Image (cartoon, helix red, strand yellow):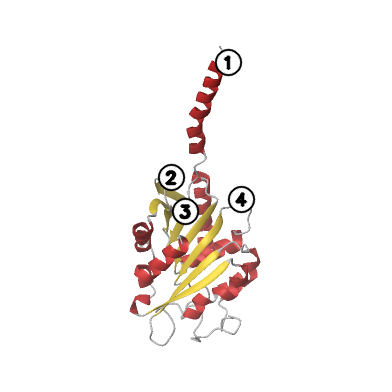
Amino acid sequence: MTKGWWVILLALITFGLAPQTVHASVQRQVPTLYLHGHHGGPNSMVPLMTAAQRADHATAVVTATVDGDGQVHLAGDWPVATHRPLIKVVFKNNRTLNYHRIADWLRNVIETLQSRYQITKFNIVAHSLGNAAVLFYELRYGDVPGLPKLQRYVAIAANFNGVPGVHHLRRQHHLGPDGRPPWFAPDFRRALRLRRHFPVNQVDVLNIYGNIGDGTYWDGKVLNVSSRSLKYLLGRRLRSYRTLPIYGPQAQHSLLRYNLEVAGATNHFLWP
């Protein structure tokens, strides 16, 4: 074979392989997990996911259902090139108040997604008790090498420091000058002991809470001081932290999931 033919053959091989090399380099985008609260189910976070799909061209790809034994079952399809993938997380036992149990369930979900789809990072949107799963997952496993890293976290109607009638009776409405809450619920005390494990300068947080305007500074279920206690707990460890109070009848605990202001702020925070 002449020298000229060798040059032509080398060029054909080089350009022939180029598309395959580009294709192999395609990586999945960072997924956003949506996690429901106490007594929630498969439809609880659909309004927020639908808003993300309509306004920001996100795509629902997979539902991760966790049974009572902690086993994770995935349903759906996640093509590699999917734009802004959304993952719905469903706990079949939606009545447990054991924070460490639901944190372990969330870890099972994340490890399953890592094994199946090789994720290295994730975002999460949680409502109500779902936030306890996120918080205690990060407090227990946030510094474990090899696990995917939380990037952006939207907390909606979160009971970080207890619920009136369950954890405390006092209804003080003001935090201390340093953000210190007026009381510590038992799980908040546990969180304080574990906060050294929360990753430093890694997570951006948007904390959304409702004030229905009846003079008691709550969303009808969770006091605002409980939701706002997150800053005292983790403020110095977060990469960024901001709050968004929602006012009026549509700020009620369950209705926050349907609130257009909440959806818009969530989407802008996730994909600015």
Q: Name the residue under label 1.
A: 3
Sequence-wise, the earlier of marks 2 and 1 is: 1
Dot in front, 3 or 4: 3
Residue at far front of view: 4
Up-down relation of residue 141 to residue 193 (above or below): above
Q: In 3D space, how far apart are the residues under numbered discs 4 and 1 (Cα atoms)? A: 50 Å
Dot in front, 1 or 3: 1
Q: Which residue type carries mark 4? A: Gly
Q: Residue at x 56, y 12 (%)?
A: 2
Q: Is residue 73 left or right of residue 107?
A: left
Q: Residue 196 appears at what percent x and percent y?
A: 65, 66
Up-down relation of residue 209 to residue 112 (above or below): below
The disc placed on residue 31 is 3
The disc placed on residue 81 is 2
Up-down relation of residue 21 to residue 52 (above or below): above
Sequence-wise, the earlier of marks 4 and 2 is: 2
Rendered image quadrant of residue 213: bottom left
Sequence-wise, the earlier of marks 4 and 1 is: 1
The disc placed on residue 146 is 4
Sequence-wise, the earlier of marks 3 and 2 is: 3
**Label 3 SS:** loop
Q: Nearer the viewer, residue 268 or 68?
A: 268
**Label 2 SS:** loop
How dense is the environment of label 3, judged by Cα within 10 Å: few (below 14), some, or many (20 and up)? many
Up-down relation of residue 93 to residue 147 (above or below): below
Q: Which residue type carries mark 2? A: Ala
Q: Which residue type carries mark 3? A: Pro
Q: Residue at x 59, y 76 (%)?
A: 232
Q: Which residue type carries mark 1? A: Lys
Q: Residue 265 appears at what percent x and percent y?
A: 42, 68
